[in-house]
Image (cartoon, grey):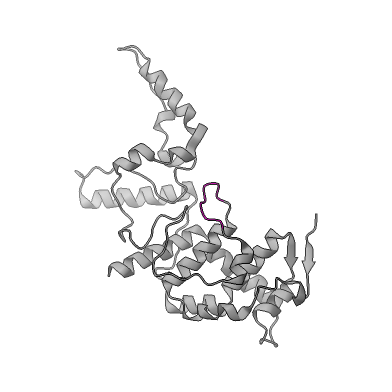
């Protein structure tokens, strides 16, 4: 079923105003994290998300303020955490490791463990199922954190080489591609503001939730009203839409949070 297309400015929500997004030109990394997190929680379906933000509310008051990044479901870092990407596996992890999200996905493993416990002394019993890495069990890698064991008796060189090989293989298996950019800069933040990324996300989210589609021409005219000698539909399709998809991604947001942690630690 084709969605109804919106072609006229009068059919956009009354709450939308490009002027409300002017503060984005002065956003620092913490401002971008706060505001992108809010959009992520609104646009990405997460069954355990505890933050519900109506799209009309965002259009009415689109700028989220705060000095500290709040930790929402799906994000592994906030500004009160250690900046390191490496941490110890704790007793909390041992007892509460995503169990409330796993449900029946652990049943086969539990049954296999029970079978091993029932084997009589002297009998041989091996299980390839219980050798399954934890990150291959449903939802155990949902936030990008994976638990491993490190033998500290190895040399630094051997441990580092083994970890590099493990990292390459595991990222490929879980289909996580780390951001190639080493560090986000003022230039990135200015580009996101100049290209009207937040209002684009908010309008497309509003359209999706209301079962309509905003034409690229109207979107271009609404976001860049002063640009006359530009093919605005092409700009929306080739520049704005791909950029928005890239930065509203959990991996990109996690990278921003990790950088913010490191900068605060410095």
Asked whether residue 213 is drawn in magenta, I would say no
- Residue drawn at x 42%, y 62% is 255
Q: Is residue 252 left or right of residue 125?
A: right
Which residues fall within the magenta stretch? 46-52
Q: Is residue 209 left or right of residue 123?
A: right
Q: Is residue 137 visible?
A: no
Using the image, determine if residue 71 lies above or below residue 9: above
| Foreground of the two, 187 or 170 | 187
> Quadrant location of residue 114?
top left
Q: How many marks?
A: 0
- Can you say which quadrant of the picture contains the C terminus? bottom left
- Residue drawn at x 43%, y 78% is 186
Q: Is residue 32 visible?
A: yes
- The prevailing secondary structure element of the residues shown in magenta is loop
Q: Is residue 80 left or right of residue 75?
A: left
Using the image, determine if residue 102 lies above or below residue 179: above
| Foreground of the two, 252 or 221 | 221
- Residue drawn at x 47%, y 66% is 34
Q: Is residue 26 left or right of residue 117?
A: right
> Percent from the top left, x then y, of residue 76?
41, 54
| Foreground of the two, 157 or 147 | 147
């Amino acid at each position: 079923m084709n969605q109804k297309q919106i072609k006229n400015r009068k059919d956009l929500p009354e709450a939308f105003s490009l002027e409300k997004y002017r503060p984005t030109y002065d956003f620092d990394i913490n401002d971008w994290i706060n505001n992108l997190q809010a959009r992520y929680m609104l646009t990405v379906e997460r069954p355990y998300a505890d933050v519900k933000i109506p799209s009309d509310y965002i259009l009415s008051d689109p700028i989220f303020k705060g000095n500290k990044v709040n930790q929402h479901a799906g994000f592994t870092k906030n500004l009160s955490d250690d900046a390191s990407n490496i941490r110890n596996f704790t007793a909390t992890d041992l007892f509460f490791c995503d169990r409330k999200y796993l449900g029946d996905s652990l049943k086969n493993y539990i049954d296999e463990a029970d079978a091993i416990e029932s084997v009589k002394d002297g009998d041989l019993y091996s299980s390839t199922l219980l050798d399954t890495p934890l990150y291959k069990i449903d939802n155990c890698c949902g936030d990008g954190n994976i638990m491993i064991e490190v033998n500290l008796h190895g040399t630094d060189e051997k441990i580092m080489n083994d970890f590099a090989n493990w990292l390459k293989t595991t990222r490929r298996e879980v289909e996580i591609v780390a951001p190639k950019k080493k560090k986000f800069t003022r230039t990135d933040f200015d580009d996101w503001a100049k290209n009207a990324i937040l209002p684009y996300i908010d309008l497309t989210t509003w359209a999706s939730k209301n079962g309509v589609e905003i034409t690229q021409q109207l979107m271009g005219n609404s976001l860049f009203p002063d640009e006359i000698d530009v093919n605005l539909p092409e700009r929306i399709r080739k520049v704005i839409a791909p950029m928005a998809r890239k930065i509203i991604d959990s991996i990109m947001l996690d990278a921003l949070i990790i950088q913010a942690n490191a900068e605060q630690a410095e």
